[in-house]
Amino acid sequence: MAKQMKNPTLSGRRWQLYVLLAPFLIIFSLMIVLPVLASMILSFFNFDMVSLPSFAGLDNYIRMLLHDNIFPIVLKNTILLAILTGPAGFLLSFVLAWFINEFGRTARTLFSFMFYAPSLAGSAVFIWQILFSSDSYGYINSFLLSAGFIIEPIAWLSNADYIVPIVVAVQLWSSLGISFLSNLSGLQNINTELYEAGAIDGIRNRWQELWYITLPGMKHMLLFSAVMQISSAFSISSIIQQLAGYPTVGYAADTIVSYLNDVGTVKYEMGYASALSVILFLLMVLTRWITNKLINKAGG
Amino acid sequence: MKNLKAILHLPARNQTRRYTRSRAGNFFYFLFLFAAGLFSLLPMIYCIVTSFKPLDELLVFPPTLFTVKRPTVSNYMALPDLISGLSVPLSRYVFNSVFIAVAGTALCVVFSAMAAFVLSKTDIKFKGIIFTVIQFALLFNSYTLAIPQYIIYSSLGVINTYFVYLLPTLASSMGVFLMKQYMDGYVPDALIEAAHIDGADWFGIFGRIIVPIIKPCVLTLTLFTFLGLWNVQSAGTIFSEQLKTLPTVMSTIAAGGLARTGSSMAVSVIMMIPPVLVYLVSQSSIKETMGSAGIKG
């Protein structure tokens, strides 16, 4: 990189770099960085969206950690759902892309279309509502009844024992979005001469090839995918509400995001909602930091 | 030529015949993927099937997933009537949706690629801090940003203009992050140094060297951004009906109640067509790009 600086033709043209960076950076600072800072500041205020914000110090955080009965439940749910869907979603979007990449052009296009179809179809969660419908006509219930596994229909979506596994399944099924596509484009870019050289050097099956050649070549795409998964795994909310409403039975599956939506939209406590989103943000930053350590270890 | 190919990571022309692959293994994968894929196709198939159902079959519960006893196009034929009742002509909604999706996608992809190039391949000041902020911004929940963003819109005077559709997409740091990772991984520094020696300036390096190589990534981001913008609906920032998008028409039709179920499915099917087309075009040109990338450098 130092070499570039000594280049006589370029030393006087650094303004071009600022021109290239400016459009995004200006809009990003205005529309994201400023609102994030505003939201962080707002978490130290009481704000009902009608009267002016009044300073509250650490009240919102004290209330959250000491006096709020719902917060511990939604915190636990958020972490549980993130653990159950984050790593699995990350693996799934890589493994499926890797499987698909094994095939020729036609099969590859067909499969990638199939797996991306839920995203293309818009809101696709309704299909799960039909499957898990709680009367005896729902597909799963009618199958289990006729096969004799159960004697009366199960209310899948209003039973605290089933709601979490169902949410996990739906989230995984609908999570094949941008990480899946970016993994596919990354896999097609790995230098195939490496694969030929690997075969000569004694790599005998696809698993060794995956470990020694494919994974190192995918490092950058995998980091991208990891961050996107962290972001989506900690923010599951609309899926739960579409399936089981808000709040779910005994807050069995509600997350911090569901809760802060409720606090802000229904109870008009924007200061408290901001404090909740700051805590969620810290939780994700911590996870991001741990993930980074893990990826660096695997890379080294 | 051979080195150039190595630098550009050209893929093999025939990836299916590799030393490390067994036929049995491939067959097993194929079956597994096909079964899982069919399941993923369910919502799309269900929408299409439902849009051809007559009213009495629509009301059957549980709905049949794959079959229609008496298929009908009446749900589609009813659309012109439903649409003629709108206060603004349909063409206006179509124009709004197409304009927002195309202009927004183009600007987003270009701005993201430009910024990612600077962050990935140059030594501009503060680039480490800027990139960290970009990554962390992806982790902040968007719900609480709505109020500050509304205040910014109103102080910029852009409420009730196309800008409220475009700005959130253009500010999204996901595209820059994706592009930067791609450039870090697949655009060799040697190529840029070579261009420096040839006397190219930064604009030239970006336009003639970076853009052709990152085309697969450009197509992926195009698809993703288009999909988001195609389904965009204003939330409290657009008041005139003239500036609203096609999803508004969809909700208007769906609001007509039970009798409109079939027609609102028909609209969903029609709404699916542009994203599917963009998907097919972008994914099939990804492979072509890969084959020809080496010759341009």
Image (cartoon, grey):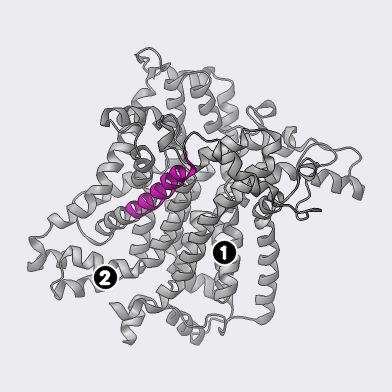
Badges 2 and 1, same chain? no
Dividing the picture into quarters, in which one does residue B16 lie? bottom right
Q: Chain of mark 2?
A: B
Q: Chain of mark 1?
A: A
Mark 2 vs 1: CB contact within 8 A? no
Could you tell me how many numbered marks the image carries? Answer: 2
Residue bearing the label numbered 1? A112
Is residue B64 depicted above or below B257 in this figure?
Answer: below
| Label 1 packing within 10 angstroms: few (<14), some (14-19), many (20+) | many
The residue at the point 26 percent across, 70 percent down is B209
Magenta stretch prevailing secondary structure: helix
- Is residue B91 located in the magenta-colored stretch of the structure? yes
The magenta stretch is: B89-108
In the rendered structure, find residue B118 and report the number of the disc placed on it. Answer: none
- Please provide percent x and percent y for residue A267: 52, 18
**Identity of the amino acid at label 1?**
Ser
The quadrant of the image that shows the C terminus of chain B is: bottom left
Is residue A299 depicted above or below A195 in this figure?
Answer: above
Q: Is residue A237 left or right of residue A5?
A: right
The residue at the point 63 percent across, 27 percent down is A247
- Please provide percent x and percent y for residue A117: 59, 56
In the rendered structure, find residue B209 and report the number of the disc placed on it. Answer: 2
**Identity of the amino acid at label 2?**
Ile
**Do we see residue B224 in this rendering?**
yes
The secondary element bearing badge 2 is classed as helix
**Do we see residue A61 in this rendering?**
no
Is residue B18 depicted above or below B245 in this figure?
Answer: below
Dividing the picture into quarters, in which one does residue A116 lie? bottom right
Tell me how far mark 2 sits from mark 1, CA to CA: 29 Å
Q: Nearer the viewer, residue B245 or A44?
A: B245
